[in-house]
Image (cartoon, rainbow, N blue to C red):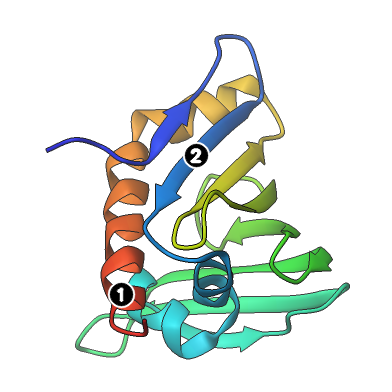
Amino acid sequence: MEQKTKVNAEAGKQEIVITREFDLPLELLFKAYVEAEIVEQWMGTKVLLLENKKHGSYGFETRDPKGNVVFKANGVIHEFVPEQKITRTFEMERTAFDVQLEFLEFEALTEGRSKLNMQVIYRSVALRDQQLKLPFAMGINMAHNRLQEVVNKLK
């Protein structure tokens, strides 16, 4: 199956550039990133906090059936421009990964299509390369496929 989400990582750089075109109008794509109920559905995790504003913060958590925390992430929103961009940090707790900086830009292509451009910056090339050794590209593609499916139901 084709990976619709494109992940580009140039050798020697501390960044990953992620792009994905969606069959969604811009306002619905943006809504998928800022409405907790929708985020929970496509990310498959509980949204503990989601303050969509400059200097806001967010937190996600996933528990196993026994109630043990298996994933926890949080960050600070540094810039928030509705239907245009979100600049935020992202940090997974209890992992070897350091905090990363994410620039999300939302772009209308047509009335019913839009594009997400993400630039993710890591503290070092080594940390970026460590991330890429995981099934990162497959995982983000699967998440974006779920986003498309969930938001299609809102149309």
Identify the residue at horizontal 78%, vertical 67% (top origin).
Answer: 77
Distance CA(mark 1)–CA(mark 2): 19 Å
Instruction: Pick whichever of labels 1 and 2 is earlier in the sequence.
Output: 2
Q: Position of residue 69 (x, y in %)?
A: 38, 78
Can you tell which mark lies on residue 19? 2
SS type, badge 2: strand
Query: In the rendered view, would you say 33 is above or below 18?
Result: below
Residue at point 26% right, 54% down? 142
User: On the image, which quarter does residue 123 sit in?
Assistant: top right
In the picture provided, is 147 more to the left or to the right than 119?
A: left
Q: Residue 152, labelled with which disc?
A: 1
Instruction: Identify which amino acid the numbered label 1 is placed on.
Output: Asn
Q: Circle 1 sits in a helix, a strand or a loop, which is it?
A: helix
Which mark is in front, 1 or 2? 1
**Residue 103 vs residue 53: left or right?**
left
Residue found 32% across the figure and 64% down from its top:
148
Q: Is residue 81 above or below residue 135?
A: below
Q: Amino acid at mark 2?
A: Thr
Residue nearer the viewer, 28 or 78: 28
Residue that lies at the very extreme toward the front in this rendered image:
111
